[in-house]
Amino acid sequence: MTTVRFDDKIVRMFLFATLFWGLVGMSVGVLLALQLADWRFNFEIPWLTFGRLRPVHTNAVIFAFAGNAIFCGVYYSSQRLLKARLFSDLVSRIHFWGWQLIIVLAACSFVMGITTGKEYAELEWPLDLMVAVIWLLFAFNFFATLARRREKHIYVALWFYIGTIITITVLHVVNSLAIPVSLTKSYPIYAGVQDALVQWWYGHNAVGFFLTTPFLGLMYYFVPKAAERPIYSYRLSIMHFWALVFLYIWAGPHHLHYTALPDWAQSLGMVFSVMLLAPSWGGMINGLLTLRGAWDRLRVDPVLKFFAAAITFYGMSTFEGPLMAIKSVNALSHYTDWTVGHVHNGALGWVALLIFGMVYWLVPRMWNTKLHSIALANAHFWLAMVGILFYIVSMWAAGITQGLMWKEFTADGLLAYPSFLETVTKMHPYYLGRALGGVIFLAGLIMLIINLALTIRAGRFSEGEIQVPEPKPIEHKPSHWHAVLERKPFLMAILALVVITIGGIVEMMPTFLIKGNIPTIASVKPWSPLELEGRDIYVREGCYACHSQMVRPFRDELARYGEYSRPGEFIYDRPFQWGSKRTGPDLHRVGGRYSNLWHLRHLEDPRLTSPGSVMPSYAFLTSGVLDLGHITRKIQVMKDLGAPYSEEQVRHAGRDAKWQARGIADDLRRNGVDVAPDREIIALIAYLQRLGTDIKKGGPL
Amino acid sequence: MEVLFFLIPLSVALAAGFTIACLGSIRDGQFDDMESPRWRVLFDRNEKRPESTAVKPAATGLEMRMKPQRSEPL
């Protein structure tokens, strides 16, 4: 017999990080919710404006809160399931500190406006590289531990972890491919529709493989442990896993219904999304029935309460998701706050509650004591429930109201609410309700932290140990390398995957990139240097967090915005800025609709032109001087990526930009406002005025 | 749109990877026994760490509780 001591110190580190980033991420979320209720909650500090802060919230909650919780739970459960200490303490530590460093750098870069402008993948290229390295270290640590296991059978939770690790690696790499312009700016190698497709293929699967599969793995470990009952049906859990990984990757197009994506791809996405309901609900039922026989304990054990609620919310959001993926429902729900409600249904209801249950279970065990206060934990549970209720009901009401108001016509066939502003001010009470829900949920988290801190103070931390019969891990008699591989299915899977993927990339990449950039609309031309700078400011400020740039072919959208968007109009857009939510109106056809002066006044103080608007004031763009330092390089990169600029245009990019800026400044002066031509706001106005105007210049569509 | 010609093969490759993993592990006998793994997770009785939970103070006896209390449909 030998003793194996588990590395629980690393589990503890990730546990603390989970709670810390949970607090940060949710606090920022509350601040953002308040900003939509009253814009002044950005305190007129550029760093705190909605567009810059939203990625801080989403990334902190997904990659910092949920991410650290995944690492915490995976490292705890894997060591026990594999009966082996983690492969390398050093790798674990690098993994931990590397991940925290990325989070801090990410938060700093987002508030400074350093972003790729792709939702949930906003990290700029140096941080993307760091993520790849740290993630691969995690993968290495995990698989090396798996290889040293003393248990032949791979428990179902581990399969979920394997699926997560492999898929996230592929998603991250494919979606992050970009050409750097400087240390803090890059352009994606995909443009327009292509970029949108890759982004939502990533975005959907990130939800699937970062917020679903790892947490299902944790569910299949921690729920039986906490309930002290075995999984209801092990067979069902295995089927749950395989069905989920096979179905998930095809459902991404449901984020792009009624856009420029081909119809068959949209239908494919819809069908697979609906099919996903089956394994998801199988898993939910399996999880809930695991608690069968422990129902009486549900009343007294907060851990089981959190788990039961989390699994129920998993069922709810995996029902809501397929529903929203049905095209006719999506026509109403897309771009509304319903989507936001759906996300939080999953994030607060499923992910956060499961994490809470897990840490309530882990801490007393790791610190060899009892939970400080069960009453406090129960109170937390009910606060969380009320918070989620406020949040989701507000967002459902807001979303459906928005959707209906946007689409409403009068008997005369005119838009019933022609001014978008009306639909914005109508949201006010719902946004207050949402903020209240967020505050309540956050209060619950604070109670959890206090409760656990007191628990930890009363207990003494120790690492788990087990006695194992033989000193060495189980033997695989290696003979022929192929035979070895066959006995290590996961290794084989990875190898096959890597080979196929590399082959695929090498072969496909140049073809699709070049083909996709052939102009299909003759009058669509690349951005001028000044417009490109303006566009980069649009990306920097995160305007896409509130504005879409995709007019769908619906009667109401045609009446409200104009011509629907054609795929060929986006071929120079890197990154695409279609957005996913319309807190403000769509901007794809805003070019030429207003005067330069209107834009200036509106951007400096949206309340001047639109009383009651929740858009932040961008007066700081009038004082900000446009940095033209990289303009030549930017145009050159665009040219390299296929935009038809001449050598001349590349060389004189700076001069051209200044010339165009002077024109706009002159126009403003004629209208009585003096703005120096070298200001950022001039570039932004140039971009807005160009948006969606090219097809009006004639030529076949 | 052409990027579909890349994303679809990539997704197929992923699915193929998972298929290989699935078939491999079936052949490996991973899924032959659908009964004992679900119980085995619960038995880490030899993990040394005074067991004490929020609900049941310091009782070990996990093995005892493992006896089915009601008839167990499997």
Image (spheres, coloured by chain):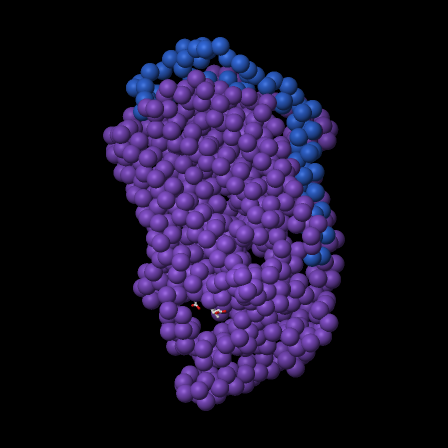
Where is A344 relative to A85, above or below? below
Query: Residue at 53% across / 44% down in the picture?
Result: A207
Q: Residue furthest front?
A: A411
The reply, left or right, for residue B11 in relation to residue A542 is right
Q: Nearer the viewer, residue A121 or A173?
A: A121
Dividing the picture into quadrants, the one containing residue A227 is: top left
Q: Is residue A112 visible?
A: no
Colour of chain A, in one word, is purple
Which residue is pictured at 50% across the width and 12% down the height?
B72
Residue A502 sits above or below residue A362 on the image: below
User: Is residue B5 rendered to the left or right of residue A595?
Assistant: right
The residue sitting at 40% across, 73% down in the picture is: A609
**Spot occupied by residue A418 in the image (x, y as percentages of width and height):** 49, 66
State the residue at coordinates (42%, 29%). Answer: A308
Chain in blue on the image? B
In the picture shown, does residue A180 fall above or below A372? below
Percent coordinates x, y for residue A240 in the rendering:
58, 30
Q: Quadrant of residue A697?
A: bottom right
In front of the other: A389 or B12: A389
Q: Position of residue A330 (x, y in %)?
A: 57, 50
- Note whether residue A522 is visible: yes
